[in-house]
């Protein structure tokens, strides 16, 4: 019969034959996104690791003042630095006297009346040597603190990076501090009008003295890496 005859090919809008899958769009079904490769698998090194913030007190991380400098209120003031220096010099004097007695070097005696200026270099030798060794070591540690600095809560740091000074610059700072004291301690008083409260030896060593409460130190007495 006529109604049993199949129609022309391609004239039907829908195929009712059972088991036939509907036509899929060009390109196949959408695939789910692949998960990132696990650590240690091939291709994991191609992905950049997520940035991690440095831990507080990490000596390898530069404090925030590396770019613009610390705020002025974070810098150590004159009186705090003066008391810290007095305590350090008192301790250095005791150590120098003990070393001088050990090697038979007498401390310089004040000149007698009428003798004029009598500078004894041999007597000041132990003091200068102990001072250079003392400040070079402690200011190059991860804390950047001498004993007097620790008691008064201040630190000596690199003015550019905020890290501890290298030994060479710590030595130059200690050596220059003696020259800062020669013209009536003018080099120390220089911090009173210097914008970043720096003395002459701070300028030479490119260092800053900051409050430890604002920039917490590392481990006291530990050499910086």
Image (tube, rainbow, N blue to C red):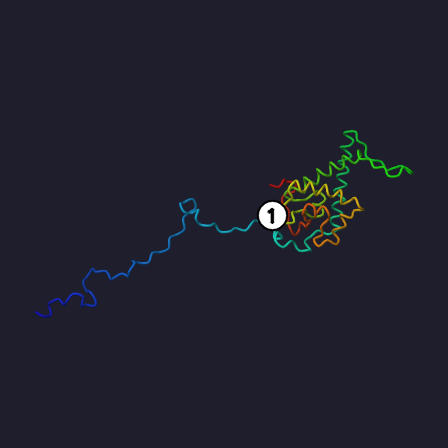
15 left or right, relative to 84: left
40 left or right, relative to 119: left
Q: Position of residue 77 (x, y in %)?
A: 73, 52
Q: Quadrant of the N terminus?
A: bottom left
Residue positioned 46% across, 50% down in the render? 48
**1 w.r.t. 225: above or below:** below
| Residue situated in front as seen by the camera: 21 or 24 | 24
Give the farthest residue toward the right: 114
The residue where tag 1 is placed is 57
Q: Quadrant of the C terminus?
A: top right
183 left or right, relative to 30: right
Residue positioned 62% across, 46% down in the render? 163
| Residue situated in front as seen by the camera: 217 or 63 | 63
Residue positioned 77% across, 29% down in the render? 103
Residue positioned 42% across, 44% down in the render? 40
Give the farthest residue toward the bottom: 2
Q: Picture quarter containing residue 170?
A: top right
Q: Position of residue 97 (x, y in %)?
A: 78, 34
Q: Picture quarter containing residue 26?
A: bottom left
| Residue situated in front as seen by the camera: 150 or 30 | 30
């Amino acid at each position: 019969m006529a109604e049993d005859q199949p129609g022309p090919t391609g004239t039907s809008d829908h195929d009712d034959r059972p088991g036939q899958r509907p036509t899929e769009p060009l390109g196949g079904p959408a695939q789910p996104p692949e998960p990132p490769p696990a650590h240690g698998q091939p291709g994991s090194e191609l992905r950049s690791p997520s940035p991690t913030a440095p831990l507080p007190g990490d000596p390898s991380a530069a404090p925030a003042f590396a770019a613009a400098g610390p705020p002025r209120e974070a810098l150590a003031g004159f009186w705090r630095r003066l008391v810290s220096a007095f305590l350090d010099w008192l301790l250095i004097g005791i150590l120098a006297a003990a070393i001088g007695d050990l090697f038979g070097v007498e401390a310089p005696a004040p000149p007698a009346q009428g003798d004029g200026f009598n500078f004894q270099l041999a007597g000041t030798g132990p003091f200068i040597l102990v001072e250079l060794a003392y400040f070079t070591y402690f200011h190059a540690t991860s804390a950047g603190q001498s004993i007097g600095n620790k008691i008064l809560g201040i630190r000596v740091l690199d003015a550019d990076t905020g890290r501890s000074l290298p030994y060479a610059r710590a030595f130059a700072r200690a050596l220059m501090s003696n020259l800062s004291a020669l013209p009536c301690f003018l080099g120390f008083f220089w911090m009173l009008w210097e914008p970043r409260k720096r003395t002459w030896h701070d300028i030479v060593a490119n260092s800053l003295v900051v409050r430890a409460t604002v920039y917490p130190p590392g481990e006291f007495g530990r050499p910086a890496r």
